[in-house]
Image (tube, rainbow, N blue to C red):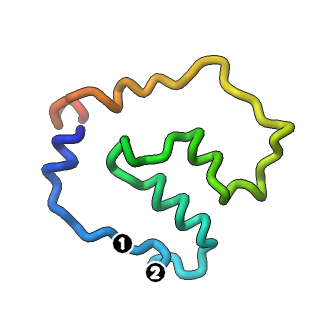
């Protein structure tokens, strides 16, 4: 997957605050961090849910944790483009 991403043409990053000028700045920051193509730079689900944007919706008293963790091993597979399809 990384080699495929690296093979894509380099396109300048769009400023999401310009694309969404009326959006909450924290929402724009969260979106920017979630839309990273590089899995090493992208927020995990846990990190995304801990982002300050969600503070207004969060009730720590009601939060629970999953009994087992998510298997993200597919993210690290070295597959050809045809195999990804």
- Tell me where residue 77 appears, x and y as whole percent: 27, 27
- The answer to whether the residues at label 2 and label 1 have Cβ atoms under 8 Å apart is yes
Residue at 54% x, 67% y: name it: 28
**Residue indicated by mark 2:** 18
Residue at 61% x, 66% y: name it: 26
Q: Which label was assigned to residue 53?
A: none
Mark 1 is surrounded, within 10 Å at the Cα level, by few (under 14), some (14 to 19) or many (20 or more) other residues, namely: few
**Residue indicated by mark 1:** 14
Task: Residue lying at the far right in this picture: please name it.
Answer: 61
Mark 2 is surrounded, within 10 Å at the Cα level, by few (under 14), some (14 to 19) or many (20 or more) other residues, namely: few
The foreground one among 55 and 20 is 55
The foreground one among 79 and 29 is 29
Q: Which element type, helix, strand or loop, lies under badge 1?
A: loop
Instruction: Describe residue 79's horizontal placement relative to residue 22 as left or right.
Output: left
- Tell me where residue 8 appears, x and y as whole percent: 17, 54
Task: Residue lying at the far top in this picture: please name it.
Answer: 68
Q: How many numbered callouts?
A: 2
Q: Which element type, helix, strand or loop, lies under badge 2?
A: helix
- Tell me where residue 39 appears, x and y as whole percent: 36, 42
Q: CA distance from mark 2 to mark 1?
A: 8 Å
For residue 75, what is the image quadrant? top left
Instruction: Describe residue 25's horizontal placement relative to residue 84 as left or right.
Output: right
Residue at 37% x, 24% y: name it: 73
The quadrant in which the N terminus is found is: top left
Residue at 65% x, 47% y: name it: 50
The quadrant in which the C terminus is found is: top left
The foreground one among 44 and 20 is 44
Vertical arrangement, residue 27 with respect to residue 46, above or below: below
For residue 61, what is the image quadrant? top right
């Amino acid at each position: 997957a990384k080699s495929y991403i690296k093979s894509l043409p380099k396109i300048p990053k769009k400023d999401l605050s310009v694309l969404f000028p009326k959006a909450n700045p924290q929402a724009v920051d969260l979106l920017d961090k979630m839309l990273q193509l590089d899995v090493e730079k992208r927020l995990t689900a846990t990190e995304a849910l801990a982002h300050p944007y969600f503070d207004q919706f969060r009730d720590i008293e009601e939060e629970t944790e999953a009994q087992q963790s998510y298997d993200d091993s597919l993210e690290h597979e070295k597959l050809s483009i045809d195999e990804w399809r």
